[in-house]
Amino acid sequence: MKSILYICLTFACLAQQVLSLSPTFGVGPEELEYYKEGKYFNCLRSNVQIPFSQVNDDFCDCPDGTDEPGTSACSSNGRFYCQNIGHKGNYISSSFVNDGVCDCCDGSDEYQLKVKCKNNCKEIGEESRKKQNQVIEAYEIGLKKKKQMEEEGTRVFNEKTDEIIRLRKEIDPITQEIKELEVLIEQKKSEREVENKRLLDEKEKKDKEIQGTDQQQQQQQQQNVDQPKQVEENKEVVGENGENIVEQPEIQTSELLDAISKGKDDNNNINNNDNNNNNNNNNNNNNNNNNNNNNNNNNNNNNNNNNNNNNNHDNNKEDEIKNNNNEKVDHTTINSNNKNEDNNDDDNEEDNDDKEDLVNKFQTILKPFKSIKNSVYNFILPILPNRFISLKDMDLGGLESELSKKRESLKEKENEIEKIDKMLKSDLGVNNVFIPLYNKCFDLATKEYTYTVCPYEKASQGHTSLGKFESFGDNGKMMLFDNGQQCWGGPKRSLKVYMECGQDNELYDVQEPGKCEYTIKFKTPVLCSEEHLKILKLEGDHSL
């Protein structure tokens, strides 16, 4: 009987305790205004109205469970707010209320005293505030770095804009110079072709002259061989006719030998042969002359004797002989004059040949100096300012070298313009804050692989491509890399990089939520904001 009475008293006490709960018990600070005492209570998240007396009566009347914030009656969808004085308040499920487990650091969720909970919110709050202060401090550092990145991004953007303007201005003169060089090169090639043709014609002419000279020398040599015979015959005739005619062949032979000894070619071998032939002919002629003279002397002596013995020789016969001798003397004189004219013509040809040889030798002497001039040009042109260089002074090789340099310079400038233009047209964030990430790569080493992320370019898993940069998403909080290496039996690999505020650029926490679909987190000052810092500071204040 006593035990039954005790049970009844217990239930009565519990019921009294439940009935004595404030309507605002278990209500969060942001919803307190909806629990002001009145005649009716409007369920917060459903269109239901109940008498205000049914709030916190341990019976779930609202479909959304908002009428029982301090009990476990609406355990499926209700929630209880832990005040946690000294720390920061938080919500727990209504099903945790009076379940015998201390869920709130102040123990307010176990008010039926099934279990005794220690209030350790102060200690937990101090530790939490310490961590929160560290987070706030890191966030402030991240904000400072973000401002630096914005300043750097703006500076680089302005520099690249100026650079692309400058490069575009430099292209026009280079293009014009290339056109001028191409015209000059065509002119030089035409001049070289004309010069080569001229040299070829000169060579052919020289070859013909040499061939003609060789034929003339052969004819002259043949004449030298035949001349002694003619001289000997002349001597015999002269010997028969008298003393005055004997000297004419000697004069004619001497003139011929003088003409032969001069020669028409500078070739040493031909000269030596001509000299040897001349010497031999002179010796033969001298011997012939001596013999003829002796014969003439003997004949003269005989004639004298005959004249002395034949004093009565017929005068008419003597006159006839004298007339014949006079005719022969005149004929010999004419031949000698003709020979002299031929020798004068040969001398003129020799003079012309000597002049041509002198010109050729002079050009041969100047050729090394011309080569030295070109070498000097090729050496000093690269180091001289443009204002000291005349393109017309360059040879063909120098012009072609200069054209190659100009084309290479033009190509470099065009490539640089293309790179800068691509960067300036990219999504560079607010105040160009993403520019410091341009052309940079970041690594994360795990046990299996090293992951590399290069914003605006590509991402990889070791040597495996995870895709090329496609775009930013989620208001600049995510980078998407797509069309990576084909996965075996699956799609092409892809990567999503989720960015968050951090004081340094750092990758962490790589995951593969789907087959060959990867995610990775990236801390960066770029995602730090003044608004979020204010929230962090407010959370720290609420924990007091």
Image (cartoon, rainbow, N blue to C red):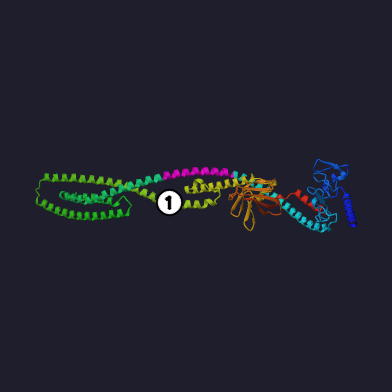
- 174 or 196: nearer the eye? 174
Judge whether residue 36 can be spotted in this image: no
Q: Tell me the kind of residue under disc 1.
A: Lys
What is the secondary structure assignment of the residue under circle 1?
Answer: helix
Name the chief secondary structure element in magenta: helix
**Residue 174 covered by magenta stretch:** yes
Q: Position of residue 496 (x, y in %)?
A: 65, 49
Q: Which quarter of the image is occupied by the N terminus?
A: bottom right
Q: Is residue 382 left or right of residue 228?
A: right
- Position of residue 360 in the picture relative to residue 407 (left or right): left
Quadrant where the image shows the C terminus: bottom right
Q: Label 1 belongs to which residue?
A: 367
The magenta stretch spans which residues? 169-195
Q: How many numbered marks have been drawn onto this rendered protein structure? A: 1
Name the one closer to the observer, 82 or 291: 82
Residue 202 lies in the magenta stretch: no
Q: Position of residue 413 (x, y in %)?
A: 58, 47
Give the residue drawn at x 45%, y 44%. Answer: 189
